[in-house]
Image (cartoon, rainbow, N blue to C red):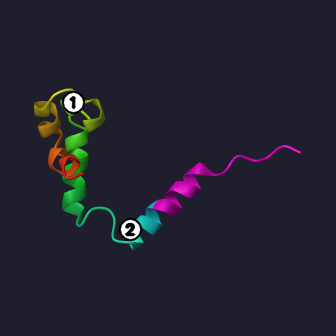
Amino acid sequence: MKEEAPDIDNLLSKAIEEALKNGKGWSSTKEKEEYLKRICDDDYLPPLFCETNEELERSGLSEALSSF
């Protein structure tokens, strides 16, 4: 008998709903829109691919990553 693949979209939606219930996510619609605007910018470089401190600073996550 062939196993069915999990419904990834449904699982992701449930995970997002649970995270939001637990206070995760953006504190406002404006914050979400600013984030989406930044990551859609052609000059945006995801922190994962930063090679210098300057690139990491521009990503906006240097402070968060340096707190670990």
Secondary structure, mark 2, is helix
Q: Residue sitting at 40 percent across and 73 percent down?
A: 21
Q: Which residues are magenta?
A: 1-15
Tag 2–tag 1 contact (CB < 8 Å): no
Q: Residue at x 20, y 35 (%)?
A: 41
Of marks 2 and 1, which one's residue comes earlier in the chain? 2
In the rendered image, the vertical position of residue 65 relative to residue 40, given as above or below: below
Q: Vertical placement of 16 versus 54: above or below?
A: below
Q: Nearer the viewer, residue 34 or 6?
A: 6
Q: Amino acid at mark 1?
A: Asp
**Residue occupying the far right of the picture:** 1
Residue 54 occupies quadrant: top left
Image location of residue 57, percent across then percent down: 12, 39
Q: Nearer the viewer, residue 61 or 12?
A: 61
Query: Which residue carries the number 2 mark?
Result: 20
Tell me which amino acid carries mark 2. Answer: Leu
Q: Nearer the viewer, residue 10 or 53?
A: 53
Q: How many marks?
A: 2
Q: Residue furthest top?
A: 51
The secondary structure type at the circle numbered 1 is loop
The residue tagged 1 is 42
Instruction: Provide residue 39's location: percent of width, then percent of height.
Output: 25, 41
Residue located 51% across and 55% down the image:
12
